[in-house]
Image (cartoon, grey):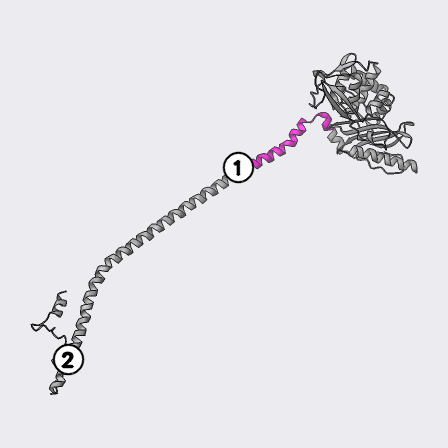
Amino acid sequence: MHRLTELIERDPRGVSPPLISARLATPNTGNSFMSAVSVRRTLRRCNRFILSFFIALAIATPAALVSSPAEAATHASSASEKAAAKKQAAKKRLAAKRAASKKHAAARKASRSVSAASKRKLMKKAAAPAAVAAALTASELAAQERRQTPPEIHNSLNLPLNVQSRAAIITNAKTGEMLYGKNYNQTMPIASITKLMTAMVVLDAGLDMNDPVTVTQDDVDKLRNTHSRLSIGTTLTRADMMLIALMASENRAAAALARSYPGGTAAAITAMNRKAAKLGMSHTRFHDGTGLDGNNTSTPGDLAKLVQAAYRYADIRAFSTTPQYQVQSRGHLLQYKNTNLLVKEPDWDIGVSKTGFINEAGKCLVMLARIRDEPVVIVLMDSWGKYTRIGDANRVKQWLERVTRA
């Protein structure tokens, strides 16, 4: 600033000292006075221009010096904000990384949990067959083994017959000739076919069919826990009990028939086995009067004899082929239907019918029917599927009709 003051300090006449001396700028050539004046004027103008330049420079320099701290402060503030933003972004990235790591760890833990659960499930599935095998009864194990053996088939006619049931026999009831046989000597559970023998021994005892028989706790199935529509305390006539036992395979009705037999259930079972032996059913054994016991066993050949013997009883013929029937049970009307759908078919002339089912026996059907005026015994054992035994019966009927036409 001192130098600037010296530059602009005026002389006593109020004129700025020349920056460039006129003498230095004017050559000493002896020119005229006018030339000297012109040169002086020119130099003054140059001095003023130069002086103005330095003044402007002097004014601008402090402004620049003053503005620099503000700009530095602004730059510092901006740099601080940028650093804070970077730090915040770094924190966010770290938080996101940690969240992703936790999520990945949770997913791994869930995967391990699912994997462990799957392993336990597979182990349970692997152990299930062994547990089931351990829970099977002797008759069920025998049924499994029996079903794996190849069938033995006898066909006395020249026309092929495709029977889906695992065991069957078709005989002429008049001559006793076996027309077709499939595993007919194989011993197997017979399920509710048992009820035909229960009915026969009750009728053989000559009991009054109009006598009342009451269902008690002893008639409840404790072996397989099957359902019955006959509640404890229901009282029906012996005839009604026998009808729904044969027609609808009502288990409590059959149990009540055997229990009300002279001497009780044990005496009835003894009579049933005695009757079987008398009929020549050498491969047949009875252990209860309902067929729920899998130890009630026989062969298709023996059952053909049972059906023919049952046909001799008028009550069994009528009861086993009744399409439907109603009974009163403790103030309620119960509607029963025949378990053999074929008894309602007009194309069938059925004299005796009985169905049966437990797991080890499969679905069973025995009938004595007249086909083209010939009495035929049809025994179908160990069928599977809802309509297999019905389909087999229809195939047998068609087969016999073709044979007699030929």
Instruction: Give the dominant element type of the magenta stretch: helix, strand or loop.
Output: helix
- Residue 57, percent across and down? 20, 67
Please state which of the two labelled residues, at mark 1 or mark 2, is closer to the viewer: 2
Q: How many marks?
A: 2
400 above or below 230?
A: below
- Badge 2 crowding class, 10 Å Cα cut-off, few under 14, some 14 to 19, many 20 or more, is few
Disc 1 is placed on an element classified as helix
Q: Is residue 5 left or right of residue 68?
A: left
Q: Nearer the viewer, residue 94 or 132?
A: 94
Residue type at mark 1 is Ser
Cα separation, mark 1 vs mark 2, equals 105 Å
Give the magenta range.
113-142
| Residue 262, quarter of picture | top right
Can residue 316 be seen here? yes
| Residue 120, quarter of picture | top right
Residue placed at 73% from the left, 26% from the top? 139
Residue that label 2 marks: 41
Callout 1 touching callout 2 (CB < 8 Å) = no
Q: Nearer the viewer, residue 162 or 258?
A: 258
Q: Nearer the viewer, residue 246 or 110?
A: 246
- Residue 317, percent across and down? 85, 23
Disc 2 is placed on an element classified as helix
Q: Name the disc covering residue 113, or none.
A: 1
Q: Residue 125: within the magenta?
A: yes
| Residue 371, quarter of picture | top right
Residue placed at 17% from the left, 72% from the top? 51
